[in-house]
Image (cartoon, grey):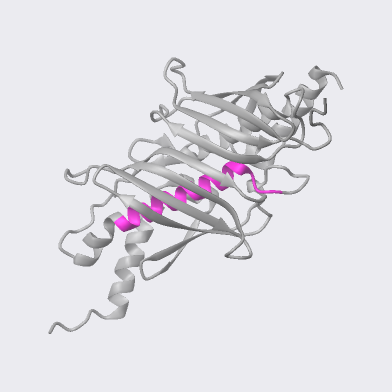
Amino acid sequence: MTPENQAEMVADFIQNMPHAKALSMLVERSGAGEAVISMPYDTRLIGDPETGVIHGGAVSALMDTCCGTAVMCHPNAGVPTATLDLRIDYMRSATPGDRITATATCYHVTRNVAFVRAVATDADTDRPVATATGAFTVPQQKAVTS
Amino acid sequence: MNKPEPVQVIKQRRDAALQQLLSDVPYIQFLGVQFDRRGDELTAVLPFKEDHIGNPMLPAIHGGVTAAFLEITAIIQLSWAMIWDDMEGKTVDLPDRIQLPKTIDFTVDYLRSGLPRDAYARARVNRSGRRYASVHVEAWQDNRTKLFAQGTGHFLMPDRTKAP
């Protein structure tokens, strides 16, 4: 399978996950261990009714999906993958009404583990809303053997 | 000695306070998270929904749903502990809208894949100061001793000296 085919297949797989659909996630770009996924503002996702700010949990779902996508389109990792550990740091509240975009990089892959970091922003792309670091499983058969 | 409060009065007060914490947050309704209360102990329940699926092949609960469920459990448990004394002491009336703690960071440890069935979680507040709090959460499905995920988070406490 060519890397382009893999990226296309991964994007398709991600967008068809029931929970990704529930949050209307859109794969903007994926390939070579990188992924960009965005999610529109939705009043059903509000965590703070006073301000209308999205709940951290919804941002976690976006981050987890984006990190997993980066792993799945990494040449030395692949499909499927599962999250082992994910840490999210919340820098500030996302601006209500803004689309949230996560960018993830799978920066190191061993035989068994893929390491990923990600950043989420809203319309103000200079100030991150949240960052994430995670460890994901690497599928057995596609692990690097050399 | 004062006569103890009638049991229904106590139950009504506590359940109303818990409902007040939950009903204001659309995202809790969106995921469908409910809370069981026994005295001051809370158990969060996540009834399974098709919408929670991540990988449809397995099928398994989306890691993001698990993370959100743990984070909601931590925030509600922390808020519940925060309002308990005011609620029980009856010296202070609870405000119409209770300000919730804000997540600083949250780490989820995925132990096994979440199966397509109901999940449960309980949180323990390890430290709650005037400004910061640290909370640990455990989640399971069929067996209480077989956790499918656990998490730890740090939270910024609302300023309760000023009215919201």
The furthest residue to the front: A146
Residue located at (62% from left, 50% from top)? B111
Q: Quadrant of residue A77 in the image?
A: top right
**Is B81 positioned to the left or the right of B42 in the image?**
left
> Which residue is at the front of the view, B124 or B121?
B124
Position of residue A37 relative to residue A17, above or below, is above
Q: Report whether residue B46 is seen.
A: no
- Percent from the top left, x then y, of residue B76? 39, 53
Q: Quadrant of residue B94 in the image?
A: bottom left
What is the count of numbered marks?
A: 0
Is A93 contained in the magenta span? Answer: no
**Is B36 positioned to the left or the right of B84 in the image?**
right
Residue located at (34% from left, 57% from top)? B80
Q: Taken as a whole, is the magenta stretch helix, strand or loop? A: helix
**Is B24 positioned to the left or the right of A11 in the image?**
left
Q: Report whether residue A141 is seen.
A: yes
The furthest residue to the right: A1
The C terminus of chain B lies in quadrant:
top left
The N terminus of chain B lies in quadrant:
bottom left
Is B74 contained in the magenta span? Answer: yes
Q: Quadrant of residue B143 in the image?
A: bottom right
- Percent from the top left, x then y, of residue B22? 40, 54
Q: Which residues are magenta?
A: B60-81
- Percent from the top left, x then y, of residue A8? 77, 23
The furthest residue to the top: A126
- Percent from the top left, x then y, of residue B88? 24, 66
Residue located at (39% from left, 30% from top)? A93
> Which residue is at the front of the view, B144 or B119?
B144
